[in-house]
Amino acid sequence: MASTWARSCSLLLYRGTRSSRPLAMAKPLCSRLQHPIQQRWSSHSPLGTSPDPARKKVTMGVLRSMYRKNVPIAMMTAHDFPSAHVADAAGMDMILVGDSLAMVALGMQDTSEVTVDDMLLHCKSVVRATRAAFTIGDLPMGSYEISPEQALTTAIRFVKEGRVQGIKLEGGKEMAPTIKKIVDAGIPVLAHVGLTPQRQNALGGFRVQGKTSKGAMRVLEDALAVQEAGCFAMVVEAVPAEVASILTKKLSVPTIGIGAGNGCSGQVLVQIDMSGYFPPGRTIPKFVKQFGNVWAEHLRALETYRDEVKSRQYPASEHTYPIAKEELDAFVRETEES
């Protein structure tokens, strides 16, 4: 088995180059597949497949099984091929192409600016990188509120053109008929209750929901309504942890919390926020834990590159392509004679 794998690896590597070297010279490279391999690729070569191609594909059945077994669901946003590639490699159960990409990827002021075509382009990019995670596309403001028919039309585009496996939309009981329409057409729906950012202007800004008894009851009523409409799970955003925990116990579908405590069935964060891919001084929501400092590492790499270019340390000899001495001598003679 091992020898067969080695032969297939060497053949794959051999075919991926324009080298005329025999296959035997390519075989040792197979043992180094876990490390970056310098091949004869251009800088626009694909990033490759997930480091863990054997990971089981997450389906609706897998998500339901996790919920029944009380296994927390890990969900992360992604907005392009690299961010989806790393999220899938990290073992995320679900990847959301959230409308937050309006700010983190497109530099917009808020999510109200992003369009369906914007979202579809990013969905396609994310899905190309995702091998195992269940992918969800976020319907942007203005693409589903007019009627259930409008919402279904948009949802179909997300599945057919964006290639995601399900869609997310914001809203409570007022969106129940819309959710039912989409679910009846065979498209999984992830609902979103509590704070609904697309409606920030009506809510008076990004305000915590359910802080009073009446407010908490409204969130619960919304959650029960979207569950009855057929959503397979729901995001619960910016709700007191105690309220979200009670809500989760009252429901029979998973809750994915964001700023709603650890009593939910799972959690989601915006990848840019949690990875620290932003400059110092940027304000992040209270519920975000910064698990890394990607900005600092990226900045360090770019500054080092700049310094080495300026000092001519880069590129070094190992980063250049050789030419036979006799060919170089011949070239020099020709240039001197011309």
Image (cartoon, rainbow, N blue to C red):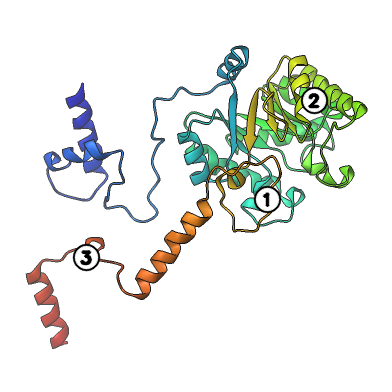
Mark seen at residue 141: none
Tell me if residue 11 can be seen.
no
334 with respect to 188 (left or right): left
SS assignment at label 1: helix
Q: Earlier in the sequence, mark 1 or mark 3?
A: 1
Dot 3 surroundings within 10 Å: few (below 14), some, or many (20 or more)?
Answer: few
Q: Earlier in the sequence, mark 2 or mark 3?
A: 2
Q: Earlier in the sequence, mark 2 or mark 1?
A: 1
Give me the residue at 47% from left, 55% from top: 297
Extreme residue in the top direction: 68
**Amino acid on which disc 3 is placed:** Ser
Check disc 2 and report the residue beneath it.
243
Extreme residue in the bottom direction: 337
Check disc 1 and report the residue beneath it.
102
Dot 2 surroundings within 10 Å: few (below 14), some, or many (20 or more)?
Answer: many
Picture quadrant where residue 306 is located: bottom left
- How far across and down, in percent of the image, does residue 68 sit? 62, 12
Numbered label tally: 3
- How far across and down, in percent of the image, does residue 325 sit? 9, 70
Q: Are marks 2 and 1 in contact (CB under 8 Å)?
A: no
**Amino acid on which disc 2 is placed:** Val
- How far across and down, in percent of the image, does residue 258 sit? 69, 34
Tell me if residue 96 can be seen.
yes
Closer to the eye: label 2 or 1? 2
